[in-house]
Image (cartoon, helix red, strand yellow):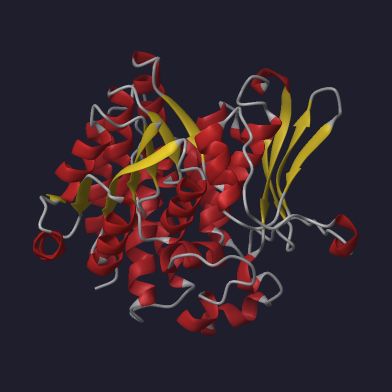
Amino acid sequence: MKNVVLLGATGSIGTSSVDVIHQHSDIFNLYAVAANSSVAKVAEIVRKYKVERVCMFEPNAAKELESVLGMKVLVGMEGLCELAADPKADIIINSLMGAVGCLPTITAIEHGKHVALANKETMVMAGPVIWDKLAENPKSFITPIDSEHSAIFQCLEGGKREHEVEFLEITASGGPFREWPIEKFENITVADALNHPVWSMGKKITIDSASMMNKGLEVLEAHFLFHIPYDQIKVVVHPQSMVHSLVQFRDGSLMAQLGAPDMRIPIQVALTWPDRLPLDTKRLDLPTLAKLTFFEPDFNKFRCLALAFEAGRRGGIVPSMMNAANEVLVDAFLKGNLKFTDIPRHVETIMAGAPNVTGHLTLDQVLEADAEARRLTLDLIK
């Protein structure tokens, strides 16, 4: 029986993770959960699965949950890291949204945990730091939850074949605006951007998908997860979202992983690899798929994707500053305080002012860059 700590228990990944754990309750025990502020949802999970430890990021929510459950509730970043380091924990599922997920990932690695990672910002912000931490803590390892990285992970047989790669192809649905002319982008509303054609996700990641920043973040994550240079990573738009990514090998073989667009599949792969267990989910019926289409992304229309590649190639603190600026701008867009087209425009401004840091990157540098980019972005949009 493996004890699982689920960070981000009430989001879409968290909800799917609970279902996977429930389907294999003979193997996994939901030992601890954390969320931001959804008191009722967390209380339901704790009672139903007899969860032993809980954390709420928002202090008032923690107080309320304590009174509801009659048990101690950890608070904030300190609480998240305490759960990530818990001696009884075997697996840490990190499905937190945004930069808040970085420190818990690092804490889990420092304590020798298996990290099932859905928080791509961890690798975007601090990829070199994560590399160092994994080298220092050989008992710890990461398995990816994002469907694209799970597909690559499976094609590479758990990372055993990285040296045989010619290039990676990360698939993208293209979001709701793949067929919109660029002239219409100035008038995109929040409702338009949240209308994703395939996936049901949280608001922030849905906006990132619409701008294709999400795919840009995945490019950086793939670089750090699989040790593949940026020049060997491609993005291909695949509207049907059945092929989750592909690997071109140096002998000319092209390997793809297909599956229904259901996040429970990559979650289970991340938890059980290299074993494959039964899962109650939809199966693909190839004759009914009709056709699968692929085409190159429009980097002019989706400027965020181009900026992400630029940030990755510049390295240092630039990815951290790009990610922080994007988080602030997406929040402002969701609140109706700026246009959709302002997101890439302001991200580019923040990146242009980002210093190039050479040499060994430290966690302090990453966190300072994140805070500085947030301050500069808020000043920019006042």
Q: Split into 4 quadrants, where in the image is the C terminus?
A: bottom left
Total numbered labels placed on residues in the image: 0
Extreme residue in the front direction: 26
Residue 318 at least partly seen: no
Q: Residue at x 48, y 54 (%)?
A: 19
Identify which residue, 13 or 328, lies in the foreground.
Answer: 13
Name the residue at 46% across, 50% down: 22
Residue 342 in view: yes
Point out residue 239 in the picture as x, y percentages from the top left corner.
73, 63
Residue 99 appears left or right of 173: left
Task: Tell me residue 80's x, y (percent).
Answer: 22, 44
Residue displayed at 41% across by 43% down: 319
Q: Nearer the viewer, residue 235 or 261?
A: 261
Image quarter (top left, top right, bottom left or bottom right) of the N terminus: top left
Give the left or right position of residue 158, taking residue 165 as reference: left
Is 171 located above or below residue 334 in the figure?
A: above
Quadrant of res 377: bottom left
46 sits to left or right of 243: left
- Residue 339, image x, y percentages: 43, 78
Residue 116 rendering spot, x and y as whole percentages: 45, 37
353 up-or-down from 376: above or below: above
Q: Is residue 187 above or below residue 274?
A: below
Residue for point 78% across, 57% down: 295
